[in-house]
Amino acid sequence: MANIRIKRTHQLGTEKARVQVEAFARSLKEELQIDYEWDGNRLIFKRTGASGSLEVGVDSLELDIELGLSLSLLAGTIEKDINKKLDAALK
């Protein structure tokens, strides 16, 4: 198994960052069949082979993903793709 941890700073404030993260999560749900739910300012997600959370703060985001064995081989590619999508979502 592999873990991916990504931290990002932003200047959006909590509410606007949550809106952006919600849009990001909806696109991942359509694209990758990820199920998610909010618990306060933490987005918790799960799909076959991966699970994790994304914590939205006033000026930062922390994303933690645990990949199952089948996706662990693609950890580098997955992390690169998520970084691109997070950058686009936080504009």
Image (cartoon, rainbow, N blue to C red):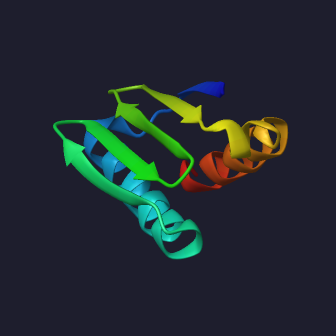
Report which quarter residue 40 is drawn in: top left
Q: Residue at x 81, y 43 (%)?
A: 74
Q: In this view, does 10 lie to the left or right of 84?
A: left
Q: Please indicate whether residue 69 sits to the left or right of residue 30 in the image.
A: right
Which residue is most to the left? 40
Measuring from the top left, give residue 59's x and y in whole percent.
41, 25
Up the image or down, 26 lies above or below 20; here it is: below
Instruction: Identify which residue, 51 or 69, lies in the foreground.
Output: 69
Residue ID at (66%, 54%): 85
Residue farthest bottom in this picture: 30
Towards the viewer: 74 or 81: 74
Q: In which quarter of the image is the N terminus?
A: top right
> Which residue is found at the position 25% from the left and 52% from the top?
37
Q: Where is residue 89 drawn, in percent x and y?
A: 56, 54
Which one is in front, 11 or 88?
Answer: 88
In the displayed structure image, the side of residue 17 where residue 4 appears, left or right: right
Number of numbered labels in the structure image = 0
* Above or below, 36 relative to 58: below
80 horizontally vs 49: left or right: right
Residue at the farthest front position:
69
Place of residue 19 in the rendered image (x, y in percent of width and height, measured from the top left): 33, 56
Q: Residue at x 58, y 52 (%)?
A: 91
